[in-house]
Image (cartoon, coloured by chain):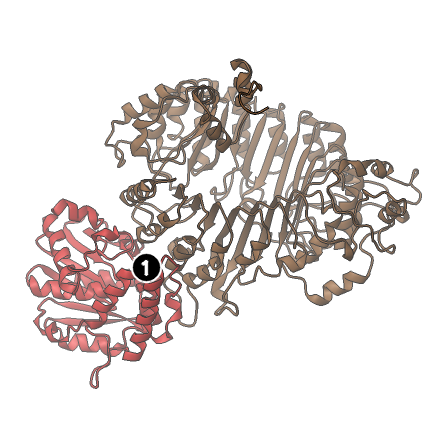
Amino acid sequence: MAGTSFATTINDLPDVILSTIISTISAVRSRNAAALVCWKWLLLERSTRTSLTLRGNARDLLMIPSCFRSVTHLDLSLLSPWGHPLLSSSSFAAAADPFLVAHRLHQVFPAVTSLTIYARGPSTLQLLALHWPQLKQVKLVRWHQRPQLPSGSDFTPLFDNCQGLNSLDLSSFYCWTEDICPALESYPVISAKLTHLNLLNPSFSEGFKAHELGDITRACPNLKEFLVACMFDPRYIGFVGDETLLSIVTNCPKLCVLHLADTAALVSARSNTNGEGFSPEDARITIATLIEVFTGLPLLEELVLDLFFNVRESGPALEVLNSKCSKLSSLKLGHFHGICMPVESKLDGIALCQGLLSLSIRDVADLTDFGLIAMGRGCSRLTKFEIQGCNKITVKGLRTLASLLHRTLVDVKIAFCKNLGATSSLKALEPIQQRIQQLHIDCVWDSEEQFKNLDGGEYNFDIYKLDDGCGPSKPANFTNFDGDGTDYDGSYPKKKKCKVSYDLNFSDIHVNGNGNGYANGSELYGKTWDRLRYLSLWIPVGELLTPLAAAGLEDCPYLEEIWIKVEGDCRHLSELSEHDFGLSSLVLYPSLSKMHLDCGDTIGYALTAPSGQMDLSLWERFYLIGIGDLSLTELDYWPPQDRDVNQRSLSLAAAGLLQECLMLRKLFIHGTAYEHFMMFLPRIPHLRDVQLREDYYPAPENDSTEMRAESCIRFEAALNRRIFD
Amino acid sequence: MGQTLLDALNVRLVGSGKKFLVLAHGFGTDQSAWQRILPYFLPNYKVILYDLVCAGSVNPDYFDFRRYTSLDAYVDDLLRILDALGVDRCAYVGHSVSAMIGILASIRRPRFFSKLILIGASPRFLNDPDYHGGFEQAEIEKVFSAMEANYEAWVSGFAPLAVGGDVPAAVREFSRTLFNMRPDITLFVSRTVFNSDLRGVLGLVRVPCCIIQTAKDVSVPASVATYLESHLGGRNTVEMLNIEGHLPHLSAPALLAQVLLRALSR
């Protein structure tokens, strides 16, 4: 009935329940919206907000509102100007006494136990640690050069004051490896309490050596999560080998997350393999050691061994992994060979790790299609699968894997595999086309002929033929296929036609008349990626983006976020045949609103191009033209770099093109930009959050084109002065 | 007033020597262009760095279109900075337009500068029947039309899309730096530069000058270096660097630093 309404609304719920409901909201914008409903909701929202990232100028810190008293996780690393030395008496914001600021922060956020902060030097933490002695988790951020101070000084204020510290994340903190061990050894009480230590930092030029790992693990026996960049190269003194691995296990038996990566693997995606796919040196790690390691870590849930050097014939060790580490759900291996070499149809190696939910393999030289199929049969619960640098696998093997895992697989990455360019990768994923949510492919455009050859022939192996002599012929996950048709909601387009010559399993279903049948790889199926939300692309410098739709990604109705990485040396290309990279072709995806455009590993000349060569302003124009056609609301952009002068700076054309993104709300430029160019941006009507973040090593010091503090203030003032209706 | 100028133009004084040295950048860059040269001079000089008012790192509101109609206003800025810092004598290294600013400054204050080092300097860019400045009128016109297109776009809220690489090769080297500023400032400043002709006053310079020239600077032909050497009034030398390009402090800083150290010690 119209008129007075006695309907019960959510507001009638008791405050306690309402508070609980509101406290479960994690999305910031939703919280902000909830806070606008009425005073009661405002108070409930404010009192249940536990995580806050402060954006705004450090100069204005005294003006922080005091309504967020329940915040336990506070991120101060993104204050403006980005990377400036907070609470240091020499900083420009010394208008306010640092002690006063620190005191105010403590007053306003009394409950903080988890802190992320940009610590340009130890003085930042000096005052904060004093006021927040109850800190338990700390993440330090520093992309600038380490100041000239005695080793370990960065950590002294923290370790002196925060006796309850149990988690330290230095993955974005530039320091030296020599800073860490002495600090941990000098504070045995704290080291003994540490349960999480993240030292996975790409700025360490060499990574931690064997004795350092030994010292760290001896000092921190209670570690549950240990992530570290190490030196596995056997040609270096102090390389990490068998003994080191064993000592880690002996010292830290409670580990449930162990992540050991070679520094080289952290820095570049590419590997140093020879023609056969093997790296020039072998890691000094034996299978016997690996078996001992797995035996010694029964609580292991996540394991990463991302090496740059060969571990050969590792299958037997991985078989043991399954039985010893029963909780293991996530595994990443780099340069482990022989992980799956099935003989006939017997599962071996990694295929025996049935419990895995996430598997990432890189540079496995001898992995073939049969290995992939075995993995698909054995690791039948995989939701995430990443494969990189495996040159013997083909679209057939991968497609069969996708079919086998069609019920669970939602996140796939295919990178740097010789036989799997864009079109082949997409073809291989057709069995999960309607399921997959996150995808990475390389934009290596297969030649037309290669594509045509694939077209007429079989895409899959016949599972049944492979299965002969192995007991019950169908692997378990096929038996209830009909029943699984109901997993999908009825909204999928019903494609009835199919070619019988293709995969027998699926055509079987269609013959049975199950209208909800799962589509196979028929050309007539149509290429709708119904659940794809996140797409990541790698594209070599100079290539165009426009063939993407034709390669198989025509219809992605719910694609929201795209990450494009452009890589290469543009100094080798003296001219562009096309003037438009093709960003505007992404208009095809109606829900696209967030983009990361990473040209940071594109190298060229900023101002010093020799005659006949192009400079980066031309390249930036090439890449950004048309970006205004997309209705992006959030954009992260990494400008190309001139390595000779350590410059990653926005050019005039880039600034002009970015300013054409009229729907933009957030823009983060990972580089530097002149004030002249930043001032183009306030023209974007709803732009509310902009920052220059030089989060690459080494971040330029202040005497550069980095926005000076005053420029930053002027720019932010101009941005904030606009009135939003 | 002095303090505001020092802030506005991002003036910095670094180094632990006794003698003052000014490093002045050219168009389209800012003082960070000297960052790889700077370490060579910190031990022995007090180095003064500043940004030209038209630099992209300076608040564009400070660029007064009525004031900066000729190079004299830039000279005013330089001298006011030096006065505010209490400098009474210094050596000066200027690139491109700053070389010309240095020349004019030394005419105004004859005993102020101990030495002028001029990198990529040119008293006049346009060719004359008997003078080879390096640029033909038609080429300069092309640069201006690109800048005017940018200006039109910028004023209307569109992206200014012309970049340094679009203009003819002959002018590209020089003009690519010009496209690194706000389009209206670029257009204005370029007109100032291409219209200026300092040939007449060169003789008034009494300070010893070192003219640094790269082997292949498309913007400044070798003949200009010789012209400067013979027409500047003081004791002059020419140093030829065997490298390409108009920005040796960016493309070959180590080599240039050695040459500068030598030139400053003489």
Which quadrant is the N terminus of chain A positioned in? top right
Q: Is residue A519 above or below residue A444?
A: above
The C terminus of chain A, quarter of image: top left
Q: Colour of chain A?
A: brown
Q: Colour of chain B?
A: red
Left or right relative to B28: residue A596: right
Image x and y of residue B119, in percent: 24, 66
Q: Secondary structure at mark 1?
A: helix
- Which sits in the foreground, A348 or A598? A598
Neighbor class of circle 1 (other Cα within 10 Å; few <14, some 14-19, many 20+) is: few
Query: What amino acid type is highlighted by mark number 1?
Result: Val
**A49 in relation to A407, above or below:** above
Q: Residue at x 40, y 63 (%)?
A: B161
Q: Is residue B123 left or right of residue A184?
A: left
How many marks do you count on the picture? Answer: 1
Q: Is residue B243 visible?
A: no
Q: Position of residue A488 (x, y in %)?
A: 75, 38
Residue A235: x %, y % from top left? 57, 47
Q: Is residue A120 left or right of residue A409?
A: left
Q: Nearer the viewer, residue A213 or B5?
A: B5
Q: Position of residue A508 (x, y in %)?
A: 89, 47
Q: Residue at x 47, y 43 (%)?
A: A203
Which residue is the site of mark 1?
B155
**Is residue A607 positioned above or below A229 on the image?**
below
Subunit that carries the residue with mark 1: B
Does the image show residue A27? Answer: yes
Quadrant of the image occupied by residue B250:
bottom left
Closest to the observer: A355 or B66? B66
